[in-house]
Amino acid sequence: MAAKSYLTQIQAIEDKVHQLVQQYHAGQERLQAAHQEIARLQQVIQEKDAEIKNFQNQDNISKIVQTIAVDTTNSTELKLKINEYLREIDKCIAYLRE
């Protein structure tokens, strides 16, 4: 009779261990999904930061052009030239980071 009781207890323990293992694997999957979501959101943040920087550069360029150029023809040319210089500077910075 005692042997049957021990077998029942062992079976109950095995069932609980099996449930814990399943819960552990489910937790690992949720953790992995959360890490992927974090990585995706960090990428989105980097893209938004780049957009903000670009908008700030455009605003600064407009302010510089307005203070330097008097007529619209010169202001457009100056703005395009400054944009070209900034793109080249950005390329140099990217190259240096590599």
Image (cartoon, helix red, strand yellow):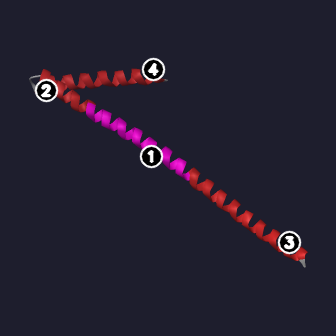
**Mark 3 or mark 1: which is in front?**
3
Q: Nearer the viewer, residue 85 or 26?
A: 26
Whichever of callouts 2 and 3 sits on the residue coming sooner in the sequence is 3
Discs 4, 3 touching: Cβ within 8 Å: no
**Residue pointed to by mark 1:** 41
Whichever of callouts 4 and 2 sits on the residue coming sooner in the sequence is 2
The 10 Å Cα crowd at callout 2, few under 14, some 14 to 19, many 20 or more, is some
Q: Residue reaching furthest left?
A: 70
**Residue pointed to by mark 2:** 66
Spatial CA distance of label 1 from label 2 is 37 Å
Q: What kind of element bears circle 1?
A: helix
Discs 1, 4 touching: Cβ within 8 Å: no
Residue flagged by tag 2: what amino acid is it? Gln
Q: Is residue 96 above or below residue 44?
A: above
In the image, residue 62 lies at what x, y percent? 19, 29
**Mark 1 or mark 2: which is in front?**
1
Whichever of callouts 1 and 4 sits on the residue coming sooner in the sequence is 1
Please tell me which residue is depicted at 45% across the width and 22% down the height of the picture. 95
Spatial CA distance of label 3 from label 1 is 52 Å
Q: Main secondary structure of the magenta part?
A: helix
**Residue pointed to by mark 4:** 96
Q: Magenta span covers which residues?
A: 33-56
Spatial CA distance of label 4 from label 2 is 32 Å
Q: Residue reaching furthest front?
A: 2
16 inside magenta stretch: no
Residue flagged by tag 4: what amino acid is it? Leu
Whichever of callouts 1 and 2 sits on the residue coming sooner in the sequence is 1
Please tell me which residue is depicted at 57% across the width and 52% down the height of the picture. 31
Residue flagged by tag 3: what amino acid is it? Tyr
Q: Is residue 94 above or below residue 37?
A: above
Give the left or right position of residue 59, taking residue 16 as reference.
left
Whichever of callouts 4 and 3 sits on the residue coming sooner in the sequence is 3
